[in-house]
Amino acid sequence: MAFISSGYNPDKPMVNRITDIGPKYYEEFYPPVIKKNKGKWLYHEILEPGICVHVAESGDELYVLRVGGCRIMSVSHIREINEIADKHCDGYLRFTTRNNIEFMVDSKDKVEPLKNDLLSRKQPGGCYKFPLGGTGAGITNIVHTQGWIHCHTPATDASGTVKATMDVLFDQFTDMKLPAKLRVSMACCLNMCGAVHCSDIAILGYHRKPPMLDHEYLDKMCEIPLAVAACPTAAIKPAKVEVNGQQVKSVSVKAERCMFCGNCYTMCPSMPLADTEGDGIVLMAGGKISNRISAPKFSKVVVAFIENEMPRWPTMTKAIKKMVDTYAGDANKYERFGDWAERIGWEKFYEKTGLEFTHHLIDDFRDPAYYTWRQTTNFKFTNAIK
Ligand code: HEM
Ligand code: HEM
Ligand code: SF4
Ligand code: SF4
């Protein structure tokens, strides 16, 4: 397509430049019933999966229909969302902190037509465009990252693993039959963009091979001390290397010390480590961020490695389903995944889920590792740990 100027003048880049204007003020986009009753809500109820009602002091009601969002979406999909909002909600809508979409109406008689409209819309391949759900004690959207769609450091894909997992957990999205809400998150490398370190179940991309070293370009591409200082296990040191008969500055990596975090590649483009066979997935479990009953918890590694099996990751989704089903059948009401695992003991967690306990799961990172070992004779005999 021929170039079309927006009016920006590349010869005078600072002329007519608008900057530091910040985001739009959120009140500009409030539905009238929200604007009127802001800060004066009395109570709310979940009427059915995906549909909540909020009642204000004034007696006003706000019905909210929550539908799954795929997060990465086209402009045409957003236009369809707008079309629905125009038709049923006076043009108003919102996105949640887990990238679901919420359509809001101010009276009960508007709920059914909106619900029917949402559920009638499908992709050509058959998937729901706007599945209703994500409320209460079920499984809502998976917070996830860029994967192979856009990032340069991933060890797995985000959108693919998330679609495969939500297909397997779909019944829990549209229902509320778990002991408590169960948050699944996904990050494609251990930068952990998102919430994997604090989720009930987490999918994490993981490497298993040390970085390759592009000695020829390393000193030209990287600030060597930054790469050295990037390494959590001090596996990297500066080195002089001969390339094509010339001595160049570079680094050396002590492979036995490297745990494949990829942090050096983040700092230094000449240390790539992605690998088709080496890369895959770690599963973590038991994290939460709320303060309800127990304090917030980090998630713990429970599956050391699962291969990348594109495009449906069957081994991974099977392990996740097994964890969800075991928790659903065994935990008490209001118990989050981590509350349950800690109450029964992690040795029982492995026995009940049938997950394999391996040496990879034993913390070996610096002094704090010691505090994750068992300094008590209090344990249960299980057949999970041989
Ligand atoms: C005695 C001289 C210098 C000292 C003590 C010094 C110190 C530092 C320090 C402490 C940082 C921050 C590192 C970090 O937070 O990760 C830094 C970053 C940086 N320095 Fe220097 N610096 C010096 C000279 C220079 C020179 C001469 C240049 C450029 C010609 C330079 C370019 C940079 C750049 C580009 C960064 C940012 C790198 C990044 O963010 O990735 N520095 N320097
Ligand atoms: C292909 C060439 C280059 C690439 C791929 C590149 C890439 C990057 C990346 C990834 C960052 C980090 C941004 C962030 O984490 O927020 C960065 C920061 C920076 N780069 Fe480059 N860069 C390139 C060339 C240059 C050159 C030629 C200069 C200077 C002459 C430069 C100066 C800087 C400085 C000063 C920063 C730090 C900015 C800040 O932290 O505020 N870069 N660059
Ligand atoms: S988790 Fe890692 S690979 Fe994924 S988007 Fe963030 S930095 Fe990129
Ligand atoms: S991948 Fe991580 S552990 Fe390995 S050398 Fe790089 S920074 Fe160190």
Image (cartoon, rainbow, N blue to C red):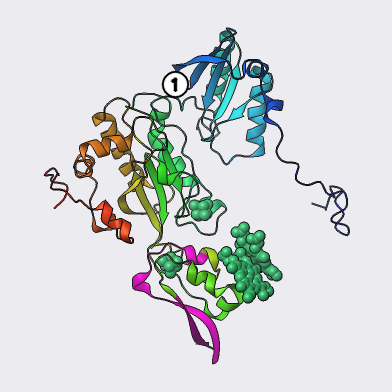
Q: Quadrant of residue 162?
A: top left
Question: Which is more toward the observer, 36 or 318?
Answer: 36
Measuring from the top left, give residue 189's x and y in whole percent: 46, 55
Q: Residues within 10 Å of mark 1 (few under 14, many from 20)?
A: many
Label 1: element kind = loop
225 in the magenta segment = no
* Residue 161 visible from this viewpoint: no
- Residue situated in front as seen by the camera: 113 or 179: 179
Return the x and y of residue 206 as percentages of the image width and height: 40, 57
User: Quadrant of the rendered structure where residue 121 is?
Assistant: top right
Which residue in the rendered view is the most extreme toward the left?
381
Mark 1: C-beta under 8 Å from nearest atom of ligand 3: no
Taking the spot 59% from the left edge, 12% from the top edge, the residue there is 110
141 or 2, which lies in front? 141
Left/right placement of residue 155 relative to residue 64 reads left
Query: Residue 79: x, y in percent?
Result: 67, 31
Q: Which residues are magenta?
A: 237-265
Q: Residue at x 40, y 33 (%)?
A: 291
**Magenta-drawn stretch contains 238:** yes
Question: Which sits in the foreground, 59 or 84?
Answer: 59
Q: Is residue 207 above or below residue 186?
A: below
Q: Is residue 173 visible?
A: yes
Q: Residue at x 19, y 45 (%)?
A: 347
**Three-letter code for the amino acid on which mark 1 is drawn:** Pro
| 239 to the left or right of 368 | right
Seen in the picture, residue 13 relative to 258 is either above or below; the reply is: above
Which residue was labeled with disc 1?
A: 49
